[in-house]
Amino acid sequence: MSQPVSHPAVSHPALSATDPELAALVAAEERLQSETLRLIPSENYVSQAVLEASGTVLQNKYSEGYPGRRYYEGQQNIDQVETLAVERAKALFGVEHANVQPYSGSPANLAVYLAFAEPGDTVMGMALPMGGHLTHGWGVSATGRWFRGVQYGVRHDTGLIDFDEVRELALKERPKIIFCGGTALPRTIDFAAFAEIAREAGAVLVADVAHIAGLIAGGAHPSPAPYADVISTTTHKTLRGPRGAMLMSREQHAKAIDKAVFPGLQGGPHNQTTAAIAVALREAAQPSFRDYARSVVANAQALAEQLLARGFDLVSGGTDNHLILMDLTPKDVPGKVAAKALDRAGIVVNYNTVPYDPRKPFDPSGIRIGTPSLTSRGLGTEHMAAVADWIDRGVGAARTGDEDALAAIRDEVAELMAAFPAPGLPTE
Ligand SMILES: *Cc1c(COP(=O)(O)O)cnc(C)c1O
């Protein structure tokens, strides 16, 4: 077994003194994030600067409203913090308006419904099992219960969106809102094609770029800014900021969006998060972030090549972005069994449905992996053969129940990861 990494006894001195039980859990999580190969495509490592900003006294302040128009006094600093975040978002994404207050991606999307639709209206998004998000009108979500969700998918033969189907559905159903984007889409989103269809159907087009916002900011994925009426994004995935979200648009929709976020849906903004978003946006505007975004994609494509060479079945045959979705049916291992075995091998992934999955959502055929986190640690394309090898051996060991093989992989993973310290984590 691997030696436990030694950590400074008191990396959080006040927390350790007040609540040793909780401090021990944080230390254990630091160790876990340090020693494992984290491949969940929606996760990342934020910088020490982002961590520090999100742990500030800004959190003590109530500031319902917007800069210059608050319902509480004492906003001399908070107004400037939020204005910085807003201006940086506008500059980075090339948009006329930005709202940085949504608590997370799901409430951001709910605010979009509030701004542009009435309960019972028809909305359209990609089906969840095809790679869409719950909040794009899927049945179990409030958005699917309070609105009439109609869903498009990908083609069975190509794994790609069929724009003839999307157009046909949009013209037949006349949705108020069309969502594009999702959580398990390995290919470039054609915002122009969606915009054309939304225009024909008279719908508001929302580009939900939660997963790929960092790639867009870094120039490694086309921007929806010229095409979408609204851009919705989380800030904590490839954008590498705190857990939060933003809604962006042209000036035309600014009022509707702001009113929907507050007072429509939320109360006071989380100012410590707003501050950390501002820091992340500043980081994302640096030339080094362009290198980061390009490397995320290069790593994903190199990893896809290596997996294909080992007989893995990748949905759509590969990737254009940070994410790979694989169908493990040919490997004769269910996604959940593989994900749990890989976790024991120090490789953290999630099990996921694949398009037209014959299995149940809680026990699907696939796993979903991505390269944002490993790229933040400095791994490059030269490491992807090793990563693919571990996944291949791990999936094989999952099939045969070989726990020794999983333990051996875990040691090898920990050894490589020790050579690539993660941002924001204590070092030995
Ligand atoms: C992650 C994600 C969300 C939701 O974000 P949360 O912060 O988890 O609520 C919404 N849409 C898409 C496409 C996502 O990937």
Image (cartoon, helix red, strand yellow):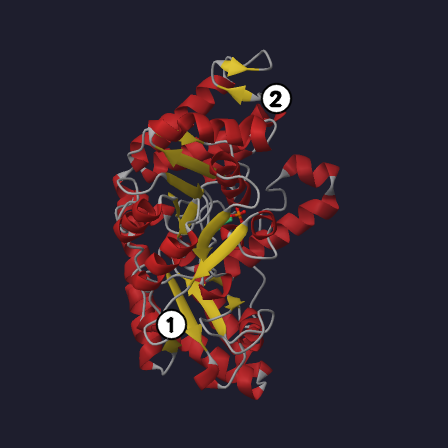
Mark nearest the camera among 1 and 2 is: 1
Please give the name of the residue rendered at 51% of the width and 40% of the height, measured from the top-left corner.
Answer: 113
- Secondary structure found at label 1: helix
Where 164 falls versus 335 (above or below)?
above
Where 399 falls versus 224 (above or below)?
below
Looking at numbered disc 1 in the image, what kind of residue is underneath it? Answer: Val
Asked whether, in this view, residue 157 is left or right of residue 22, the answer is: left
Mark 1 lies on residue: 315
Which quadrant is the N terminus positioned in? bottom right
- Secondary structure found at label 2: loop
Residue 109 x, y percent position in the rendering: 50, 43
Mark 2 lies on residue: 62
**Residue 269 visible within the image:** no
Q: Residues within 10 Å of mark 2 (few under 14, many from 20)?
A: some
Residue 292 x, y percent position in the rendering: 31, 50
Residue 87 x, y percent position in the rendering: 36, 26
